[in-house]
Image (tube, rainbow, N blue to C red):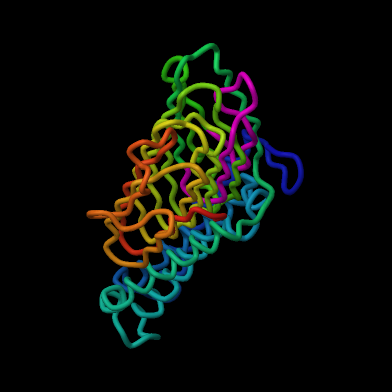
């Protein structure tokens, strides 16, 4: 099945997983009978079985070799939850199972959320690395959409003649929607990014033709170096992320629409580029370089915005996070 680690042929993988379930189910019924437990007390053994089967699945499919201990996140979660519920249903814990779930499920969500964020910024494991090379093929304009859930994403300018290129650790799925139109998404067919393997993309997009770029990121660290691009528009959606964007130096007129969640977003406007900025952050902090972009009306605007050869219109909305718009280094 893979080189290195535990090698299991594809034909045997299904048999091993099926055998684990059959043996596990048999053990559940034997323990129930030996301990004389009614199903009202024994049912939490099934979540424990799910966790154990998950352990076996991770090992025989080699996912632990890609992501290390992160691959065992869900098996451990199932075993811990099942063990706590079993202790509750059998009386080892005074609080009943339903009361436990009702009282502590928000804390479980918080813990899992923090775990996922840690994994996004501190991934482990080797992971699959794919080379990306999509030719421009004479397209006069380009439209690229990037969907990236978790990990580290860096975007810059592609090599001459390429619509998109680079390396994608963790795998990439490419979808062409016609000349110059491309969609890139993380490949989750062999395990979820960072949960079961690490993910890091370093890619380039075309700087040779006018470009519309859409970027949707989740729990990630993202750097968009768009300084050399002929960027017409940027549609940016961020989740629990840290995102830094260097805007174009000489693209004429550029429109930026950003919607950020519980995130940190920094936008750098190069020297010589005018900007008009509108922010609609619900909670959090906003820091605008008011020397270059003084307050004007409902936002901020360069004094020469109307006549500037290179200018960017920025509209940012969001929930809880921080926004910085700077004229210096980000």
Observer-nearest of 324 and 37: 324
Q: Is residue 223 left or right of residue 126?
A: left
Q: Residue furthest right?
A: 4
Res 171 quadrant in image = top right
The magenta segment? 148-172
Q: Residue furthest top?
A: 138
Q: Residue at x 46, y 42 (%)?
A: 273
232 to 237, vertically: above or below: above
167 to 325, vertically: above or below: above
- Residue 126 in percent (x, y) is at 69, 48
Does residue 163 appear in the picture of this structure?
yes
Q: Is residue 45 left or right of residue 157?
A: left
157 part of magenta stretch? yes
Q: Which quarter of the figure is the N terminus placed in?
A: top right
Which secondary structure type mostly characterizes the magenta part of the structure?
strand
Does residue 18 appear in the picture of this structure?
no
- Residue 180 in percent (x, y) is at 47, 19
- Residue 146 in percent (x, y) is at 46, 36
- Residue 179 in percent (x, y) is at 46, 15
């Amino acid at each position: 099945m893979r080189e290195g680690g535990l090698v299991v042929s594809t034909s045997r993988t299904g048999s091993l997983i099926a055998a684990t379930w059959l043996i596990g189910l048999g053990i559940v019924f034997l323990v129930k009978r030996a301990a004389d437990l009614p199903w009202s007390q024994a049912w939490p053994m099934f979540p424990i079985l799910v966790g154990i089967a998950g352990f076996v699945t991770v090992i025989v499919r080699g996912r632990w070799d890609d992501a290390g201990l992160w691959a065992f996140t869900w098996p451990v979660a199932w075993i811990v939850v099942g063990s706590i519920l079993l202790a509750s249903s059998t009386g080892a814990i005074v609080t009943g199972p339903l009361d436990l779930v009702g009282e502590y499920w928000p804390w479980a969500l918080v813990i899992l959320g923090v775990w996922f964020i840690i994994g996004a910024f501190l991934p482990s494991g080797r992971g699959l690395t794919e080379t990306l090379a999509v030719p421009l093929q004479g397209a006069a304009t380009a439209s690229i959409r990037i969907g990236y859930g978790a990990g580290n994403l860096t975007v810059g300018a592609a090599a001459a003649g390429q619509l998109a290129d680079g390396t994608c650790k963790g795998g990439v799925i490419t979808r062409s929607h016609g000349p110059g139109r491309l969609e890139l998404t993380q490949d989750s067919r062999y395990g979820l990014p960072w949960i079961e393997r690490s993910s890091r993309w370093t890619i380039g997009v075309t700087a040779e033709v006018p470009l519309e770029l859409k970027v949707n990121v989740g729990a990630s660290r993202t750097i968009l170096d768009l300084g050399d691009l002929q960027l017409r528009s940027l549609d940016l959606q961020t989740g629990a992320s840290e995102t830094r964007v260097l805007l174009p130096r000489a693209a004429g007129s550029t429109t930026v629409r950003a919607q950020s969640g519980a995130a940190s977003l920094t936008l750098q406007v190069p020297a010589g580029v005018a900007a008009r900025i509108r922010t609609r952050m619900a909670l959090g902090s906003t820091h605008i370089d008011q020397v270059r972009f003084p307050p004007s009306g409902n936002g901020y605007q360069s004094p020469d915005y109307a006549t500037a050869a290179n200018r960017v219109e920025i509209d940012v909305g969001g929930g809880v996070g921080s926004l910085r718009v700077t004229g210096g280094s980000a």
